[in-house]
Image (spheres, coloured by chain):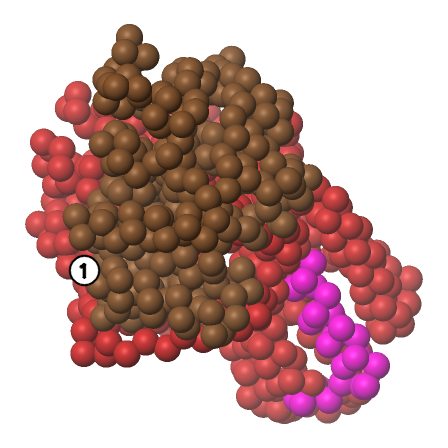
Amino acid sequence: MIEIKNVTKKYGDKVALNDVSFTVPDGEIFAFIGHNGAGKTTLIKAIVGIHDFDNGEILINGKSIKENPVSCKSEIAFVPDNPELYENMKAIDFIDFICDMYEVSAEVRDKNIKRYAKLFEIENNLNDPISSMSHGMKQKIALISALAHDPKVLIMDEPFVGLDPKAVFDVKEVMNEMVKEGKIIFFSTHILDVAEKLCSKVAIIKNGKLVKTGSMKAIKGDKSLEKVFLELEG
Amino acid sequence: MKKIMTLIKVSLNHDMNIFRINTKKQSKLKKILLPLLLVAYLMFLMGIYSYKLMEMLVPLHLEFAVLTFFGIAVSFITLLEGIYKSGSLLFNSKDDNLLFSLPIKKRTILFIKVFKFYVFELLYNSLFLAPAMIVYAYFVNPSWTYYLSSVVALLLLPIVPIVLSVIIGFITTYLSSKVKGKSVFQTLISLGFVFLVMYISFNSDGFVSNIAAKAASYNEMITKIYYPLGAYITLVTDFNVITLLIYILSHIALYILVLLLLSTLYFRINSSIKGVLVNHKNKAYHIKSTSKLKAFIKKELNRFFTTPVFMVNAGFGLILFVLASIMAAVRFDALIKIVLENDPTFDLEKIRPAFSIIAFGLVAFTSFMTSITSSMISLEGSSFNLLKSLPIKPIKIVMYKVISALAIMLPCILLGDILLFVKFRLDIISIILILIASFILPFLSELIGIMINLKYPKMDASTDTEAVKQSMSSLVSTFSGMGILGMSALVFYLIARTGTNTNIILTLFLLFYGIITILLYALLNKKCDKMFNNIIV
């Protein structure tokens, strides 16, 4: 479970996150939506321990990201919106590097890398330098390295950007499989149709303040998520 | 013209603002205090050297030789540095895609990049040259024409070395774009050019003697050897408006002409270097698991060996150390033979303790002038967030980087040590002391480097060169190394005057460096988390 309690983050005078609180339960796909600059990436970076926050608390399976960052991070996999990979490495070396950092056993990594490389149809490119790859291929490498260590919590910032339709479908399938195993998927997106169909829970953020959170059904009612979002945006 | 000015303004604001530091919660004064102190210290040191030199030159009526000496030094350093920096500065910048998509001429882009290169070298040269110019003015009390000529010379002296290094940068980048291991190839060619320039400089006695014999005056001699400096000295001693105009126009013409010629190739080379040669036949991949430390060292070595400017910057001192050791080993017997021919009473054993000082000095010089870690954080760029998201404590990540740097440095230093030990036939205590120094000093140097980079990271560098050579971290690190070496030499001199045994002095130095290392490690351990997390990408 991810518990976000009264999180506030300021950049100088600008309040990026204003007393944000909500909970992401186990076994749920949770969509986090909002306009550009609403504070989505700021909160995601705070959850995964990349950015500090001024007030509040974030708990990952009961542990504070501030107090126990290493323990929390070992349960999380993070896929950023713009894949931040080591361009000078070969793809397989990069994935191996991430697995080494998460102390993934040879058996598990072998199974997972082969499985996801096949799923994303990138087996024949794992020996290529990352610098030679397209944005979509880099995104696939970021996804494989995130999934290779069997995370309990998968956090993604705009995961579908740059992926081809087949890969988008595959990622959705993987997400569904993971939640069946009781894992948590939390991601930000601007593709509201996908969020509506895929997610059981949703949070909407506007100007750093949480404006709605709850089950997808309760939030959208008879309307589409897009309509609800646009109404909230005013 | 308006477009060019806007581009220069934006580019300089982004790239040359070495005072922009990606940390938070620090006052601006606190951030720039240390660099300002170091700059002041360096300029003061250069002023002292100039003053001492001037005291010797005044009785000989060769006051302007102080300007020649510092002018040659800065031109030579600019050329050497420029050779390995230019390839990275001109090609493969992160903003290339943006710049080439703009409705501006390609030669304008080249002009802006070379201009940025020039501005940085101008600032760097001023630190060394300006104190000498001030000392000259203090002793000679010249007329206003001296100040005018000096300002013009300060502005013009970087041009010729930069133009030469830009040409070499074009050649190395063009050649390396044709091969698969382009980074290593580019590094090797750059190093080849650097050593070629050094070889020519140190073996030009005949050429210089020939010119000196034919020259009617000192000015004429310098002008024939190196016009930019000779013309300046002529202006200082015998000011003439025509000479000044020719001096200015010749430099501007050279700058524009070379850039116009090179601009026809610029886009083509830039496009070809962007491609990555991929061997699509080799599709088999191997999954290897290893420890965190080994994986990290592998990653850092990979970064090192695929970044030419990083490799040459760190490798230059290390290779020089090994070469100096080889030269010492090869030439040692011949040197002793010459000394014995001139002085048959010469007793080698009497000066043997000095050999351990030389070996120790070489290790200290190489260690403190080679700071690999001072750019390791900056080179992470946006990937730094990836490091932050890993389940590893910041202190471990930082120490992994220090260990990776040592993995590069230690083999070279130990190889040099062995050569020196064998040839100098040092006593066992000296050998042990120098071996200990070979571990402690590089560790201390890299510890200082990583702390400086944590304090002054440059995470938004457009090129690797900016991170490695044109950042606050690299400047502070270089000046710190110089400062430590200068202080150590002074303290050594003061102790040695008392007649203390060499090995005792070395032991005292090692104890001092050891204590500093422990204290710095404790400080890093305490502050690392905060410094690491304060870096925002």
Q: Which residue is drawn at 46% across and 44% down?
A: A27
Q: Can residue B126 be seen in this view?
A: no
Q: Which amino acid does label 1 sit on?
A: Gly
Q: Quadrant of residue B17?
A: top left
Q: Which residue is drawn at 59% across and 46% down?
A: A72
For the C terminus of chain A, the image quarter is top left
Q: Which residue is drawn at 18% across and 78% down?
A: B281
Q: Is residue B321 left or right of residue B504?
A: left
Nearer the observer, B272 or B216: B272
Residue B384 against residue A114 in the figure, above or below: above
Magenta stretch: helix, strand or loop mostly: helix
SS label for mark 1: loop
Residue labelled with disc 1: B275
For the N terminus of chain A, the image quarter is top right
Q: Which residue is drawn at 25% across and 19% down?
A: A222
Which colour represents chain B? red
Q: Is residue A74 left or right of residue B9?
A: right
Residue B242 percent across, percent down from the top left? 23, 32
Q: Which chain is brown?
A: A
Residue A138 percent across, percent down from the top left? 29, 54
Residue B11 against residue B250 in the figure, above or below: above
Range drawn in magenta: B422-445
